[in-house]
Image (cartoon, rainbow, N blue to C red):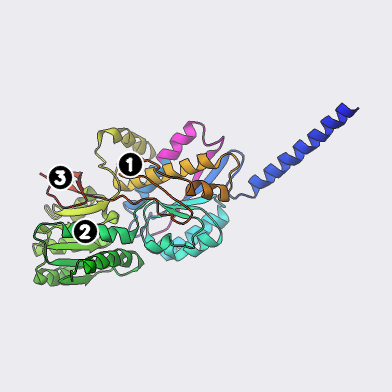
Amino acid sequence: MRKHATRRTLAVLGSALALVAGTATAETPGVTDDTIKIALMVPLTGPAGATVGPGMSAGAQAVWKEVNESGGIHGRMIEWVEEDTGCSAEIGIPGVKKAIYDHEVFMLASGGCSNEILSYRDIVIENGVPFSVWGATNDKITQQPNCCIFRTSLRAGYEGVLQADFARSIPNAERFAIIAQHDAWGQAKYDGVMAKLTEYGITPVADEEMTAETADATPQALRISKANPDVIITDLYPKPTTVFLRAAHQYGLTKLPIILHTSINDLVQLEKDVGIPGAVDNAYTVTFTRDPNAPDLEPWKAKLAAIASEIKLTPYSMWGVTGASVVVEALNRAGRDLTRESFIKAMESIEGFESEMIFGPITYSMDDKDGNKTGMFQKLHMGKQMDVGLTFKTVE
């Protein structure tokens, strides 16, 4: 009788524990017994829609598809929904609300544009939703207090420092010009550049502004030309960068070193967009991704083509591969008992994570959610994007 009673008691306790465990899973949005739902917040329209968004999305899908084919993470498959952010508040805010409240996702990922993310940052934090940001750079995105937004791309202020240091390393360069957007995205990079130039005692001979929608940069290019600079630093979206380079080429300015940034990571595509031979020959861009032509990265080209035949291995798809791999690492660390809280703690525990796509490691902590602090410069050489280093040199 005692044995039967003990068995009945254990069975009741087991059922209760299973019910509690089931309730815990049910109370974690986007997590079921066999799936984890993630929202890919990517610009598919707007200023970054043609290049940044599709590349990041395909990179992530290639990683997660491979994970699922290997059995998933602790018995769960990764599901994803794609939400267009349009690189704008007008599309981004409804998109993130749809992801959180309608799709009820476990977490958000990707995030290509600073202006858009800043517009809904408070919504993410108020709901305690983990967000792995792979492309947007504005310093305020990850500033404290910040429960749950992590970044794998470089911080804008740090990019600005890299740009200023690189420009200063150019032999005999004494006259510096800068042209930038002064929205939330561009201002952060601009401030980083100007703070470093001020530290060096340098005042730009030209300080010009464009917006994301500027259709003709002739006035800006003309004023820069009259200022006779030795180097030009730009902090512009891809579209206005193309507009500026076309105008700058008319005045011979593209013969000077032109310093770009991570939002212009794909110089091959930039050359196509500009459409003028020689206009990108002296452009140097900040990046944190490796040379996409590296032989060991060759297998990724087929993986990306399996997602979408038009997607190539570019810095943008490499952002997606890196960010998605970090998410997988944290999901593995969080274990089977997955909650948003356990995932955030797992992200904060990542130290020295190496991705084959980037130069340096990813390290987070409770107080520092900017995991990437390793930059590099690249330029075009014979139609391919090549590493230069952190100081100026010509590539022969």
Where does label 2 land, which residue? 165
Where does label 1 land, which residue? 357
Query: Please, what is the three-letter code of the amino acid marked with disc 2?
Result: Asp
Q: CA distance from mark 2 to mark 1?
A: 24 Å
Left/right placement of residue 113 relative to residue 165 reads: right
Residue 259, compared with residue 180, is above or below; it is above
Which numbered disc covers residue 381?
A: 3
Residue 79 in picture, x, y percent from top left: 51, 43
Q: Is residue 287 located in the magenta-colored stretch of the structure?
A: no
Asked whether disc 2 touches disc 3, contact meaning CB atoms under 8 Å apart, the reply is no
Residue 68 in picture, x, y percent from top left: 49, 35
Front of the two marks 2 and 1: 2
Residue at 51% from the left image edge and 35% from the top image edge: 72
Mark 2 or mark 3, earlier in chain: 2
Q: CA distance from mark 1 to mark 3?
A: 20 Å
Specify start and end residues of the magenta stretch as a single range.
62-86
Can you tell which quarter of the image residue 113 is in? bottom left
Residue at 11% from the left image edge and 61% from the top image edge: 173
Q: Quadrant of the N terminus?
A: top right
Residue at 13% from the left image edge and 72% from the top image edge: 223
Circle 3 Cα neighbour tier, 10 Å, few/some/many (<14 / 14–19 / ≥20):
some
Asked whether disc 1 touches disc 3, contact meaning CB atoms under 8 Å apart, the reply is no
Query: Please, what is the three-letter code of the amino acid marked with disc 3?
Result: His
Query: Please, what is the three-letter code of the amino acid marked with disc 1?
Result: Met
